[in-house]
Amino acid sequence: MNEKLFMIVSLLTGVVIGSVFFGGLWFTVKKGMTSKIPALWFLGSFVFRMGIVLLGYYLILQNGSWLNGLICLTGFIVARFIVIRQTRIFDAKATIVKEERKGVGHEA
């Protein structure tokens, strides 16, 4: 495979596994805090998320180039910022909807 193309694939792989990792963490915290068995949510999510990350890095590092691993790590970190931004937007919209629903029944 062309080296530049594999670098792009490494970056995109990093973004995907980072999105799965951090998006899954956000989802786990949301669901785990209201669950009757939060330890199961947190442990299961951790094992699943780490499995995805390790598999992704294993596949990227198969060609023997540490540079592709570094590029994948960069994509992973970029995904962190993307997920943080998107989850803040989602939480803000959910809060607005909750406030509107509360206000409907209490109008004079």
Image (cartoon, helix red, strand yellow):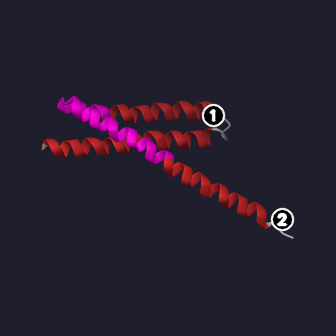
Quadrant of residue 97 within the rendered picture: bottom right
Determine which quarter of the picture holds residue 32: top right
Label 2 vs label 1, nearer the camera:
2
Give the residue number, with chain letter if any, for mark 1. 38
Q: Is residue 83 magenta?
A: yes
| Residue 99: quarter of image | bottom right
Judged from this view, the residue extending furthest toward the bottom is 108
> Is residue 102 shown above or below 37?
below
- Give the x, y percent position of residue 88: 56, 50
Residue at position x 48%, y 44% from top? 23
Residue 20: percent from left, percent from top: 43, 43
Position of the C terminus, as image quadrant, is bottom right
Q: Which residue is mark 2?
A: 106
Q: Which residues are magenta?
A: 56-84
Instruction: Give the residue drawn at x 28%, y 37%.
Output: 71
**Is residue 59 visible in this depiction of the protein?**
no
Of residues 43 and 69, the one drawn nearer to the viewer in this rendering: 69
Q: Element at badge 1? A: helix
Q: Amino acid at mark 1?
A: Pro
Q: Which quadrant of the rendered structure holds the N terminus?
A: top left
Residue 58 in percent (x, y) is at 28, 31
- The mark nearer the N terminus, 2 or 1, is 1
Q: Nearer the viewer, residue 93 or 54?
A: 93
Q: Amino acid at mark 2?
A: His
How many residues crowd mark 1 within 10 Å: few (<14), some (14–19), many (20+)? some
